[in-house]
Image (spheres, rainbow, N blue to C red):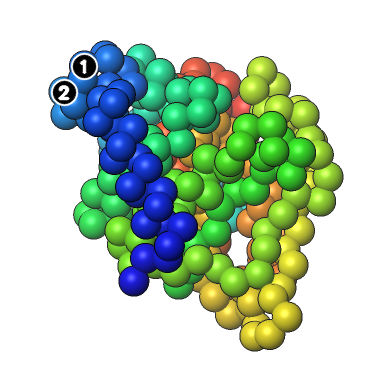
Amino acid sequence: MPTLAAFLQQVGQELLNLVFPPQCAVCRTPGALLCDSCLQQFPRVAAPICDRCGCPTDQPGICSACRRSPPSIDGVRSVIVLTDGARQAVHRFKYEGASALAAPLADLMADYWSRHPLPADVWVAVPLHIARERERGYNQSYLLGREFGQRVGLPPLSGTLKRARRTRPQVGLAAPERRVNVEKAFTYCPPRQGDGVRGLRVLLVDDVCTTGATLEACSVALMAAGAVSVWGFTLARAAYLSETHSTGNW
């Protein structure tokens, strides 16, 4: 049964939709937050991909970067490639206050999951530093995780994965700089009762994977706290140059 706050929020949103009908975040066509035409044009991450980092590759298996420097995280999977309309939608969701886009974007993740499920008992979102979350008004990765979890029946992790320190934005940093920027930046705080993450398979949810450095740093914290496995699952994969990936992302 929905809470009073959730009910009031739903009523408020319906009233807003009557006064200001929703428009597609990409083409601005009235009727839906993301129209079917634009959704169908979002490029999907297609096989073959690396079994570990999830990057598109020339052939199946583990890519050369992951063979040279195996990550701690068990693997990463992403649904769409961050180009063109997909980039525009994610930017509006992440930076322009369009938090309602979490629902249609989570639909894409749930659809992928129905065909390619990953081993997971719980989900947890990549956290923002509290100061940055206050600036933005929400954690877009948490909103995605909540909507996705509701769709596939995956519960949230008890306890808190949080940033132990504020880091520079990853945007614009090269892969080695990204690794250094988020190294030891995350910690897991268990709940007052129960085992928390110990013995669980964790699905780590984020909006975009670029080099995997943030997902890797989070997985290290979760594994240190007792998780038996950690898989990263992101809405989007940033477009990259193959020669950049060949230097090793992790």
Seen as rendered, the residue at the extreme right is 165
Question: Image height check: is 130 above or below 81?
Answer: below
For residue 20, say whether it is visible. yes
Seen as rendered, the residue at the extreme bottom is 194
Q: Quadrant of residue 67?
A: top right
Which mark, residue 29? 1
- The quarter of the image holding the C terminus is top right
Which x, y percent locates residue 23?
Answer: 27, 22
Residue pictured at 31% horizontal, 18% vertical: 26
| Circle 1 or circle 2, nearest the eye | 1
**First in residue order: circle 1 vs circle 2:** 1
Q: How many marks?
A: 2
Residue pictured at 74% horizontal, 44% vertical: 130
Q: In this view of the protein, which residue sits in the foreground, 107 or 103? A: 103
Task: Calculate the distance from the C-alpha at mark 1 to the C-alpha at mark 2.
Answer: 10 Å
* Tag 1 near tag 2, CB within 8 Å: yes
Question: Mark 1 is on which residue type?
Answer: Thr
Q: Is residue 94 left or right of residue 43?
A: right
Q: Is residue 42 left or right of residue 40?
A: right
Q: Is residue 230 left or right of residue 41?
A: right
Q: Secondary structure at mark 1?
A: loop
- The quarter of the image holding the N terminus is bottom left
Mark 1 burial class by Cα count in 10 Å: few <14, some 14-19, many 20+: some
Which mark, residue 37? 2
